[in-house]
Image (cartoon, grey):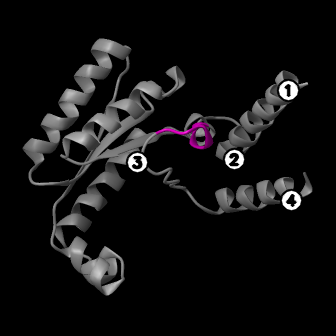
Amino acid sequence: SESFAGMHGEFRDLESQHDWLIIDTGSGMARETDGFIRAADHVLVVTTPDPAAIAEAYAVIKQLPDSTDSRASVLVNRVASSEMAHDIWSRLRHASRSFLQSNLGYAGIVLEDSTFGESVLHQCTLNVLDADCEAMRGLRQVAARMEDLVVPQADDGYFGRLWLKECVAIAGERRVST
């Protein structure tokens, strides 16, 4: 439709003005988020030390398309220590290699920090509340690591890939329903 084409143009303009676009699809994998993930230059799977969160992260990793191999990495958030984070990533990487023949990168960690709660209470971002807090230092390290991990695909850009995948999916649905 015209509105979808107009929105596509707006997103393409946004993409041309920024080096990074981070799209938070929320927890888990759903049909609605599948296209976003397939079109991404890099998939960042975020988990916490909570066993349910680790299990959900692995469930997401299992559903990643084969084409994301080496284009996916794990960020361990709100963790007590770097050793615990590395252990969580190692277990996810081992399971991915053993059962999925997939190579999972390490994006880094964001240590637990009391500033998280304060930022919610004060309704402001971490960097505004305390730009040098432990969590912000971790986020800066993750951003630096992502510079090395993310290799942009040489094609029509993220929204071009997303647009193409959605058009193909819509065309396939129409063929099935007619």
Determine which residue is flagged by label 3.
147
Q: Name the amino acid type tagged 4.
A: Ser
Q: Disc 1 versus disc 3: distance between alpha carbons?
A: 43 Å
Q: Position of residue 98 (x, y in %)?
A: 28, 13
In the image, which residues are magenta? 29-34
Picture quadrant where residue 59 is located: top left
Q: Residue under circle 2?
A: 159
Q: Say if mark 1 contacts mark 2, CB within 8 Å.
A: no
Q: Which of disc 3 and disc 1 is earlier in sequence?
A: 3
Q: Is residue 20 left or right of residue 131?
A: right
Q: Amino acid at mark 2?
A: Phe
Classify mark 1: helix, strand or loop.
Answer: helix
User: In the image, what residue type sits under mark 3?
Assistant: Glu
Q: Is residue 31 magenta?
A: yes
User: Pointer 1: residues within 10 angstroms few (<14), some, or many (20+)?
Assistant: few
How far, Cα to Cα, is label 3 from label 4?
34 Å
Mark 1–mark 4 distance (CA, rounded to whole Å): 24 Å
Q: For numbered disc 2, what is the local secondary structure?
A: helix
Image spot of residue 89 (x, y percent): 22, 35
For marks 2 and 3, give the one nearer the viewer. 2
The residue depicted at 78 percent of the width and 54 percent of the height is 8
Task: Relative to 23, say whether 62 is above or below.
Answer: above
Q: Residue at x 68, y 57 (%)?
A: 16
Q: In the rendered image, which residue does mark 1 sit on?
A: 177
Residue 132 is at least partly visible in this image: no
Residue, disc 4:
3
Q: Residue at x 49, y 54 (%)?
A: 24
Distance Cα–Cα, label 2 vs label 4:
15 Å
142 within the magenta span: no
Few, some or many residues within 10 Å of mark 3 (<14, 14–19, 20+)? few
> Does the magenta stretch mainly form a helix, a strand or a loop?
helix
